[in-house]
Amino acid sequence: MLFGTARLTVLKTICRSHPRPHTRSFASSRPPRADRAVIYSENGDPSEVLNVLTFPDLPPPGSDSVTIQFLLSPINPADINVIEGVYPSKPIKTGALASSGKGSEEEPVFIGGNEGLAQVTAVGSSVSSLKINDWVVVTKQQHGTWSTRKNVAVTDVALIPDAHKLDEAQAATITASVNPPSAYNMLNDFVRLEKGDWVVQNGANSAVGQAVIQIAAAHGLKTINLIRNRENVELLKSQLGQLGATHVLTYDDLLDKSIRGKVKEWTGGKDIKLGLNCVGGKDTTLMSRLLGQDAHLVSYGAMSKQPLSLPTSLFIFKNLTCHGFWQRRWYADKTPQQRDTLMRTIVNMLADGQVHYCSK
Ligand SMILES: NC(=O)c1ccc[n+]([C@@H]2O[C@H](COP(=O)([O-])OP(=O)(O)OC[C@H]3O[C@@H](n4cnc5c(N)ncnc54)[C@H](OP(=O)(O)O)[C@@H]3O)[C@@H](O)[C@H]2O)c1
């Protein structure tokens, strides 16, 4: 599928600036040539504030820590917002990268990135839950994953269960802590959906949107997917169709008054029970009119940067319920066992071929 593999390449290039000894069939203690991280000192436009810092060898991990080498670190829209300083969760500066200058105690820096797939390369003396070569994802928020290597507390990473079933890109983009789990949880947490039920979503070609399409299809749910118009829109429609989208419309299609009749025909008059919104603005107002009786509208992003405005009649006459979703809150509210169950579910969907990825 199209889970942002192009974006992954950027970080892979930085990480591959030193030898890559860590394929899974290869246990090696060969040291990397140099470690590097994408850092910034102040919030601002990423093209102006980001720099690459080369830092000296890491010390061995502390007794409750592990050294991890990042294999792939995605770039998400929220990562850009964090650098700009407009995202609610804030990173903490580190002074552990150098003994003097940038990255030292005197000049601490932020390291970019919130998600990443990494391999354990050294374990502290008290660590029994992880071993060298294990694949992990970073679970601590805003830990700074745009780095070649790091020492991290063992409690800040989670072992990827059954990692042998996945390749690097799958593990980094699909078991990473935000997008696919968000899709899965939004389809499960707000309304009980049965096979044959309908879901409408916008931003359908986003990484989350594609995960929604595939996870919904794997559960026998039908989806109406909204995207922005573009030159080769038919190609995108057909790609999303191949992923399992039942129907794909553009926001422009929603302006046509006959569209509600057409959607009614598609659903056989069945109420659409769930709407997923990562866009906001007037396109979402139009989308909300497709929702049926007692539907739930879940907002998880605001890509248009426009406020969400909904007709009062939907609340009075259709009993619409609106929610916000934040995967970070989900992790904070749940137990490690619930998180592990979620990850295993997604790994197994991948291994069973229910969810795929391909490049954008
Ligand atoms: N709440 C949570 O827990 C959570 C979790 C994951 C993601 N998110 C949010 O979900 C959103 C999507 O994330 P992602 O990683 O899946 O993104 P992505 O793969 O980078 O895709 C971005 C999407 O936004 C659309 N878009 C961009 N600018 C737009 C505009 N002005 N108007 C309408 N659509 C626009 C793009 O459409 P085009 O192709 O037409 O440009 C594309 O569909 C982001 O807002 C992200 O922060 C939230």
Image (tube, rainbow, N blue to C red):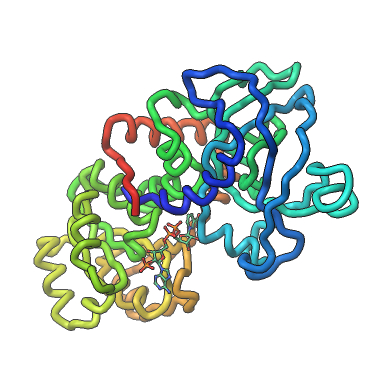
Residue found at x 54% / y 48%: 11
Picture quadrant where residue 224 is located: bottom left
**Residue 132 falls in which quadrant of the image?**
top right
Q: Nearer the viewer, residue 77 or 218?
A: 77
Q: Quadrant of ligand 1?
A: bottom left
Residue 294 visible in this rendered orientation of the protein: yes
Q: Is residue 104 left or right of residue 283?
A: right
Q: Position of residue 246 (x, y in %)?
A: 18, 56
Residue 106 relative to residue 173: left or right: right
Viewport quadrant of the C terminus: bottom left
The percent coordinates of residue 65 (x first, y second) are 73, 27
Q: How many marks?
A: 0
Q: Residue at x 68, y 53 (%)?
A: 52
Q: Is residue 86 visible?
A: no
Report whether 293 appears left or right of 172.
Answer: left
Query: Is the residue 143 above or below the residue 153 in the image?
Result: below
- In this view, 232 is above or below 31: below
Image coords of residue 295 (percent x, y) = 31, 63
What residue do we see at 61% from left, 51% from top?
113
The answer to whether residue 350 is above or below residue 73 is above
x, y percentage for residue 53?
Answer: 72, 50
